[in-house]
Image: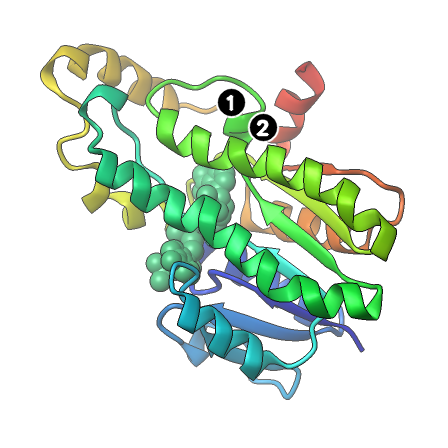
Amino acid sequence: MKTVLITGCSSGYGLETARHFHAHGWNVVATMRTPREDVLPRSERLRVVTLDVTRPESIAAAIEASGPIDVLVNNAGIGAIGAFESTPIATAREIFETNTFGVMAMTQAVLPQFRERRAGVVVNVTSSVTLARMPLVAVYTASKTAIEGFTASLALELEQFDVRAKLVEPGYGPTTGFTSNGQSRMDGLISAPYAAFAERVMTDFGQPAAVTREADVAEAVWRAATDVTGQLRFPAGPDAVALAQAR
Ligand SMILES: NC(=O)c1ccc[n+]([C@@H]2O[C@H](COP(=O)([O-])OP(=O)(O)OC[C@H]3O[C@@H](n4cnc5c(N)ncnc54)[C@H](OP(=O)(O)O)[C@@H]3O)[C@@H](O)[C@H]2O)c1
């Protein structure tokens, strides 16, 4: 029986991905900054483990507590909508700490066991912002685009050990906790010169032609984790799939 460790399982795409792997008979290590047992089914195959991907000691403790794992899903992520000019560099660093360095640190923490066993998959969840340009998300896009390049390169050096690295690129998911979790970070990020432009952009954001559901991402992560064709990128959700096809 295979074991998956997923980061950021308290809500949204990560929570649904944990449920999906569990429903497929896997052992699931559902990690959260603040553990909550009540959001997932009670099962011998499902463990909730504390993990903050920005803290090295938290990563070491979670890897130790998890035991051998077959698949790592780097799903935890944070965002902010704002004009780059009015985004403090401290906020940019905060976003990169989770979305970029957190992913790298988690990957480094599992690679020794994957390499030694000559098996394992790292699935990195980025975003459809890497597929088409969007305004007011420059820092977030940079943090996710870094992981696109990172994963593409990493996949090549891990092939020799039969270890795989994959990308899942979800589209816009209005039903996750993403926007509310980023709300406080966004205060003051739309300064006066950008206000009229931001209002137009936010109106467009509010009327999407298609959106991504949690189940779309869980299914794409599942396909990425079990893929043996060598496919690197898995757009998730109808909006992301359309953007990927238009490229
Ligand atoms: N929703 C969208 O529109 C969208 C679109 C494309 C890509 N994505 C990406 O999809 C992934 C999941 O997002 P979501 O939409 O499901 O949002 P979400 O509901 O806010 O889930 C994000 C998860 O990441 C966790 N997290 C944040 N910082 C963390 C840290 N330092 N260490 C460990 N966990 C941390 C959160 O935990 P807490 O509860 O502790 O904050 C939460 O469980 C993210 O990587 C996001 O960038 C989202």
| Residue to which mark 1 is pinned | 209
Q: Secondary structure at mark 2?
A: helix
Q: Quadrant of residue 72?
A: bottom right
Q: Residue furthest bottom?
A: 44
- How many residues crowd around disc 2 within 10 Å: few (fewer than 14), some, or many (20 or more)? some
The answer to which of 151 and 8 lies nearer the viewer is 151
Q: Is residue 179 in view?
A: no
The residue depicted at 46 percent of the width and 54 percent of the height is 102
Q: Quadrant of the C terminus?
A: top right
Quick check: 180 left or right of 147? left
The residue depicted at 51 percent of the width and 62 percent of the height is 7
The answer to which of 20 and 90 lies nearer the viewer is 90
In this rendering, is residue 154 above or below 240? below
Q: Kindly check if marks 1 and 2 are in contact, taking CB atoms under 8 A apart as contact.
A: yes
The answer to which of 60 and 168 lies nearer the viewer is 60
| Residue to which mark 2 is pinned | 239
